[in-house]
Image (cartoon, rainbow, N blue to C red):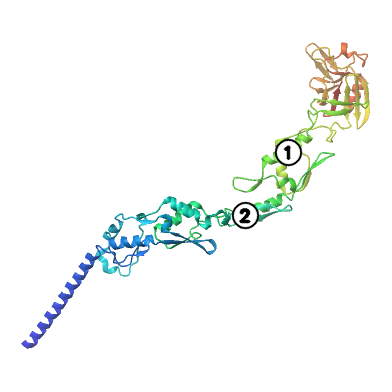
């Protein structure tokens, strides 16, 4: 019994001794590992893309220096193109800065036994340097940077084919963003990358508008719709047409990029209409009752387009999508809209021959001698020009600084100057206006004044000339 106990005791001692020995060996190995990795990189350590596992600072820096000198970066360009930049091209070099020592010191060396499956990447690009001028020159020398090899990107755009508007697709091109390209290449070299794809790094300039752009498509459709409209201006014996050939030049864009009719361009067109068709204040060639041609200047008769109102109305008409015939909005209107805006119904007053003829649709219905204003007294001469009849009043009282006169028929055309009966006169015509003329009005016999009053309308032209 005692022998068996002795044997059992001896076995336990051996086991304990082995365990103790194993623990001592393990502790020793762990301690050695901690000590070893205090000056060596842990397994799986990559520095700037180079495997530096188990290397000391000196070994790592030596490797980096050697690898950097032999370093070449593959630059992948569009359509599988490839170029290369070497360390020599840009004077790339490793500069010892103490970073390697710090990286080793800061490792998790107390858990070194867990690092065998790790993959630790260190970026110490700050320990690499290059010559900026050489880098810039090298970038400029790349084939992909040569002007003959570059196609600039072009935005998709709306183009007029002559018959309609259509979208011309964008041109992708192969032009590079010079600044970004240098940043990407320099960054790749400092990090020890073996290649860099300029397309994947978004270094290429791109069109800002593509043919699939919904706003571009909507604008193209809108332009075609607006150009489908025909607006015809009716000027009696003349017309002006606003169609595709005109409207296509008026397109602009609002602040959101939507196609609109540019008000400034439309206003230029309406202004030109005014230059052609406005007649108020214009000099007219007038054919007299005795077939003479005289020039008529001044007066307030004629047509004037309301520019602001017509610009707004024209834009609304085009936007309505309805083809139509229209007249412009007028600020002042004449009695006839033809080229000869005096027309065939008017009152003609010949001051030299002291004669008034009233034409109705080309037929003289009143022809009478008159007495006009005295030209030898300041402020009494009858004003020349083409006027619109301002009003009709019967009876009326005419007043001035030194007179007050009752008349039966009063037809003013130039302020306080008008046509009226003059029952106090027994004679008309001749030269009496030069010594016994009126204060500017046209005096006519009572029956003639009645005939004129019965047929004349407000707005009819009154032509006065010498």
Q: Is residue 427 left or right of residue 236?
A: right
* 438 lies above or below 166: above
Element on which disc 2 rests: loop
Q: Would residue 295 appear left or right of 307 to someone viewing this image? A: right
| Few, some or many residues within 10 Å of mark 2 (<14, 14–19, 20+) | many
Q: Callout 1: 10 Å neighbours few (<14), some, many (20+)?
A: many
Q: Residue at x 79, y 35 (%)?
A: 277
Q: Between residue 262 and residue 163, name the one nearer to us.
A: 163
Instruction: Name the spot of residue 214 as percent of width and height, x first.
Output: 61, 55
Is residue 457 visible to the viewer in this orientation of the structure? no
Q: Label 1: state its secondary structure.
A: helix
The residue where tag 2 is placed is 156
- CA–CA distance in space, label 2 to label 1: 33 Å
The answer to whether 28 is drawn above or below residue 412 in the figure is below
Residue 375 visible at all: yes
Q: Nearer the viewer, residue 398 or 437?
A: 437
Q: Is residue 352 above or below residue 116?
A: above
Give left or right: position of 281 versus 5.
right
Q: Is residue 362 left or right of residue 189?
A: right
* Image x and y of residue 172, in percent: 58, 57
Q: Residue 126 location in percent, x, y?
A: 36, 54
Instruction: Give the labeled residue for mark 1.
Output: 270
């Amino acid at each position: 019994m005692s022998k068996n106990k002795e044997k059992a005791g001896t076995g336990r001692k051996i086991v304990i001794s082995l365990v103790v020995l194993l623990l001592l060996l393990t502790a020793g190995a762990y301690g050695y590992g901690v000590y070893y990795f205090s000056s060596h990189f842990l397994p799986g350590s990559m520095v700037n893309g180079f495997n530096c596992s188990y290397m000391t600072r000196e070994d790592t820096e030596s490797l980096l220096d050697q690898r950097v000198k032999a370093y070449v970066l593959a630059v992948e360009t569009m359509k599988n193109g490839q170029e290369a930049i070497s360390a020599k091209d840009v004077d790339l070099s490793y500069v010892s800065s103490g970073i390697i020592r710090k990286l080793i010191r800061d490792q998790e060396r107390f858990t070194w036994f867990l690092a065998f499956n790790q993959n630790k990447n260190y970026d110490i690009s700050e320990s690499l340097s290059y010559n900026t001028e050489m880098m810039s020159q090298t970038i400029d020398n790349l084939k992909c940077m040569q002007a003959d090899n570059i196609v600039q990107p072009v935005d998709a755009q709306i183009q007029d084919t002559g018959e309609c508007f259509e979208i011309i697709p964008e041109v992708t091109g192969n032009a590079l963003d010079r600044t970004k390209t240098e940043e990407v290449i320099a960054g790749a070299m400092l990090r020890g990358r073996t290649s860099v794809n300029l397309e994947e790094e978004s270094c290429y300039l791109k069109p800002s508008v593509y043919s699939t752009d919904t706003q571009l498509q909507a604008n193209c459709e809108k332009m075609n719709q607006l150009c489908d409209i025909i607006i015809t201006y009716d000027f009696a014996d003349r017309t002006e047409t606003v169609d595709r050939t005109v409207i296509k030049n008026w397109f602009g864009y609002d602040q959101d990029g939507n196609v609109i009719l540019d008000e400034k361009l439309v206003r230029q067109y309406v202004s030109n209409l005014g230059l052609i068709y406005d007649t108020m204040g214009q000099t007219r060639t007038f054919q007299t009752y005795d077939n003479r041609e005289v020039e008529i200047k001044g007066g307030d008769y004629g047509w004037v387009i309301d520019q602001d109102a017509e610009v707004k109305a024209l834009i609304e008409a085009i936007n309505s999508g309805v083809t139509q015939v229209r007249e412009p909005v007028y600020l002042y209107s004449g009695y006839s809209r033809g080229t000869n805006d005096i027309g065939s119904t008017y009152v003609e007053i010949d001051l030299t021959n002291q004669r008034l003829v009233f034409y109705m649709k080309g037929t003289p219905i009143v022809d009478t001698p008159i007495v006009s204003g005295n030209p030898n007294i300041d402020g009494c001469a009858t004003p020349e020009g083409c006027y619109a009849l301002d009003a009709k009043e019967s009876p009326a009282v005419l007043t001035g600084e030194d007179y007050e006169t009752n008349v039966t028929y009063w037809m003013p055309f130039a302020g306080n100057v008008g046509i009226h009966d003059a029952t106090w006169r027994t004679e008309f015509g001749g030269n009496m206006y030069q010594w016994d003329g009126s204060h500017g009005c046209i005096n006519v016999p009572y029956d003639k004044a009645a005939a004129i009053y019965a047929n004349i309308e407000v707005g009819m032209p009154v032509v006065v000339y010498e």
